[in-house]
Amino acid sequence: MIPVLVSTSLERVTDSSWAPTATVAMLRRRAAHLATIRQFFFARDVLEVETPALAAAGVTAPHIESLQEASTGFWLQSSPEYAMKRLLAAGVGDCYHLARAFRAEEQGRYHNPEFTLLEWYRVGWDAAALMAEIEALVAEVLGDAPVHSKRYAEAFLAAGLPDPLSASDIEFEQAAIAAVGALPVGLDRDAYLDLLLDAVVIPSLPTRCFLTHYPASQAALAQLDPNDPQVAQRFEFFCDGVELANGFVELTAADVQQQRFLKDQRQRQTLGRRAMAMDERLLAALKTGLPACAGVALGVDRLIMLAEGADSISDVMAFSWKRA
Amino acid sequence: MATYSTNQFKSGLKIMLDGDPFSIVENEFVKPGKGQAFNRVKVRNLKTGKVIDRTFKSGESVEGADVMETEMQFLYGDGEYFHFMTQDTFEQHAAPAAAVGDAAKWLKEQDMCSVTLYNGQPLSVEPPSHVVLQVAQTDPGLKGDTSSGGNKPATLETGAVVQVPLFIQEGELLRIDTRSGEYVSRARD
């Protein structure tokens, strides 16, 4: 029997749904922005590298869901981070990656399950040097504007919220309910912080602003601050209220990385998420030796959206998820 | 009743929250790169009309509300209930005054209305966007003045009071926009 194939497109197939979600003029300007980015790194002698979009390991990050390819069981990469770190351990030096990344279940005004991510690493750099380079790249694409920098905790306090480093979970729950209304049960402290960051802190930031020194509980793959282990050497960059980039002074110790993976796996279990294996090849590369480096990932669709004054990233992509 | 996951949320979807039926007004997916994903929504309580904010963890499921909008003909009011009928099945529904609310002042017998049924009972009534109603009472205007500005109140056959031009006389049929409550024009039978 021949199986009947049913379209699974999110948008009903209609006479007009074949058409791109961006105008042709927009696609031309998008191409020009991509050329600007490549030129920026070429001029600075940063090597463009390509890594597998489909690989044996996904990520253990508690809030990132990888997409799995059906016939091989391989995972579409949610970022090129692990493969780029293996290249860095192999001695590739300063490098960047401008390509698609994939994250399941993320769809909205600023999200698309398949999106374009720019990620780059600078060997021997600290956070301040990398932040200055991000500022320069963003100015190339968006034009010049003043850039501010605040510590994560300072920004919370300035917005009239409890101190992320010392206040109790109950205080955060109450602040979150006051900000966004009734909440689902079973949220952890970091979920309250995420909600408040989005609803209260980000709207209070200047047009271009770095948030630095994220709480250690949100260190991800960043080193903790040697002077204050309550915070991590992780920063994010916000532009016009949009989260644009996330950077780390990279964790290089294999044993610490393994502990973080184990913690991620326990958290995934608590959250009822699918169990994910840790990337043993990344751990092996770290054991061989990752040079001290700082790295950052930047959402290119969002950057182009801001450059073009568009309302949503779907306006700057040829075919957004609904029409993919 | 069906359940809906947050990734099926869109404006107009009818869901149950705290035992009441709600309609989604706005749905926004928010997620910091490394953090928890949420759907922040504005929902309207279909009983009270009040709009509130709610936040869901993305991936949560919510029960759908058995809410249906149906075109029905207004038959008559008996002082306590307003009676409607679906024209294809002749099925009749009695809506309490509370469910009809402000729509009552535009309801004329035999007009078609949009009635929202919740678990089979009328929950709210939407009058037609335009109705033709007769002027029951208005002060005499200036004879012959058909153009210049100036308004006066007129009470219509349903009891509604609208501002009309000075030349409108008692007994005339007027076309009214029920969304704004404003006079549009004279109407011919």
Image (tube, coloured by chain):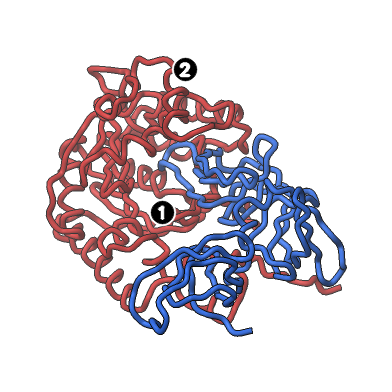
Chain colours: A red, B blue
Residue kind at label 1, given as amino acid type? Tyr
Which chain letter goes with mark 1?
A
Q: Earlier in the sequence, mark 2 or mark 1?
A: 1
Residue displayed at 36% across by 82% down: B147
Q: Nearer the viewer, mark 2 or mark 1?
A: 2
Residue A170: which disc? 2
- Tell me the crowding category of disc 1: few under 14, some 14 to 19, or many 20 or more residues within 10 angstroms, Cα based: many
The picture places residue B16, in percent across and down from the top left corner, at 68, 42
Q: Are marks 2 and 1 in contact (CB under 8 Å)?
A: no
Which chain letter goes with mark 2?
A
The picture places residue B172, in percent across and down from the top left corner, at 57, 77
Give the side of residue B7 with respect to residue A319, left or right: right
Quarter location, residue B145:
bottom left
Give the side of residue A110 with respect to residue A297, left or right: right
| Measured Cα–Cα span from mark 2 to mark 1 | 30 Å
**A315 is higher (above) or lower (below) than B123:** below
The reply to whether label 2 and label 1 mark residues of one chain is yes
| Callout 1: SS | loop
Query: Can residue A279 be seen in this snapshot?
Result: no
According to the image, label 1 marks what residue?
Answer: A110
Residue kind at label 2, given as amino acid type? Ile
Residue displayed at 50% across by 40% down: B53
Residue displayed at 29% across by 57% down: A303
Q: How many marks?
A: 2
For the N terminus of chain A, the quadrant is: bottom right
| Callout 2: SS | helix
The picture places residue A74, in percent across and down from the top left corner, at 58, 51
Between B93 and B2, the residue placed more toward the observer is B93
Between B19 and A165, the residue placed more toward the observer is B19
The picture places residue A167, in percent across and down from the top left corner, at 37, 16
